[in-house]
Amino acid sequence: MITLNALEKSFGQNHVLRGVTLQVPKGSSMVIIGGSGTGKSVLLKCILGLVTPDRGTITVAGQDILHAKGPKARSAFLDRFGMLFQGGALFDSLPVWHNVAFRLLRGAQAMPAQKARALAVEKLRRVGLGPDVADRFPAELSGGMQKRVGLARAIATDPEIIFFDEPTAGLDPIMSGVINSLIREIVVEMGATAMTITHDMTSVRAIADDVAMLHDGTIKWCGPVAQIDHSGDAYLDQFIHGRATGPIAAIR
């Protein structure tokens, strides 16, 4: 579904991506791990077109997205995606249902408000929130509830591809487990292709089919999640066990 080939991106003298090559099969869940500042978020932004890479190619379902022209092509491309943002990114001034249905209420094909609200209530139910939540505002919800609202928004349009940016950041272990379970269930149920960036190894083991280790701008290791404990890769081994010494510490 997604193919990255020799992707490079620099910001001045800061070389963030140094030739990233990665394939994400259709209907699979790929989790990208790596330390803070290793380029995980930049990678997602390149795929979404928010950042333009300096070199390399990106294809989604065989389409070269770096050369897609025009607002209609751009809009059609983005319609394939849903995203759960790290901080929730909910609109404080809008009720929960409007947050969930935000994309459905915009553009030439905007859905009637009553229909959009009904769909939002159904998506909220899917993530374990009752209809009473629909008319509340984000500030009235706990962090875990806000994260679930963000997940409901991510799946509101039944996207083919869903990105999860640090989905359990700021949550306690129990709520993190709830979010991980929901993500796994929804991705399988929808048959969506998922890309997650995280440094939470509990999330990795709960969500991933495959794992890619990003460090120093390149993919150091990629393979099935079942193999991460026996990969034989020094970078991956140090990271997943949180060791202070190893090749990552030596480079830093």
Image (cartoon, grey):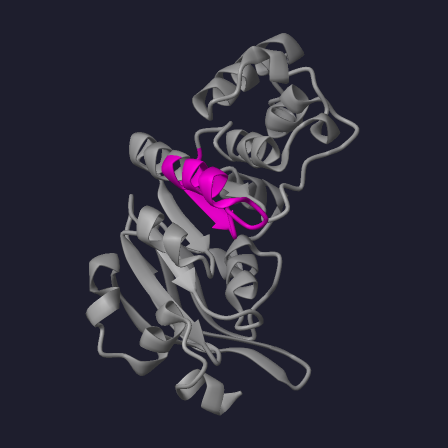
Name which quarter of the figure residue 133 lies in: top right
189 and 24: which one is in front? 189
Q: Residue at x 37, y 37 (%)?
A: 181
Q: Describe residue 87's horizontal placement relative to residue 180 as left or right.
A: right
Q: Residue at x 45, y 81 (%)?
A: 244
Name which quarter of the figure residue 184 lies in: top left
Q: Is residue 169 magenta?
A: yes
109 and 16: which one is in front? 16
Q: Is residue 168 above or below residue 126?
A: below
Q: Is residue 115 magenta?
A: no
Residue farthest toward the bottom in the current orientation of the protein = 250
Q: Describe residue 190's horizontal placement relative to residue 232 as left or right.
A: right
Residue farthest toward the right in the current orientation of the protein = 93
Q: Residue at x 22, y 78 (%)?
A: 232
Q: Is residue 91 above or below residue 52?
A: above
Do we see residue 127 in this rendering? yes
50 and 73: which one is in front? 50
Q: Residue at x 56, y 19 (%)?
A: 120
Q: Is residue 21 above or below residue 234?
A: above
Query: What span is colored magenta in the figure?
Result: 159-181
Q: Is residue 220 above or below residue 176?
A: below
Name the spot of residue 45 as percent of width and height, x first.
57, 58
129 and 224: which one is in front? 129
Residue farthest toward the top in the current orientation of the protein = 114
Name which quarter of the figure residue 111 lies in: top right
Name the spot of residue 85 as percent of width and height, x first.
58, 46
Name the spot of residue 178 as percent of width and height, x first.
43, 35
Name the spot of residue 38 as percent of width and height, x first.
53, 73
Do we see residue 62 in this rendering? no
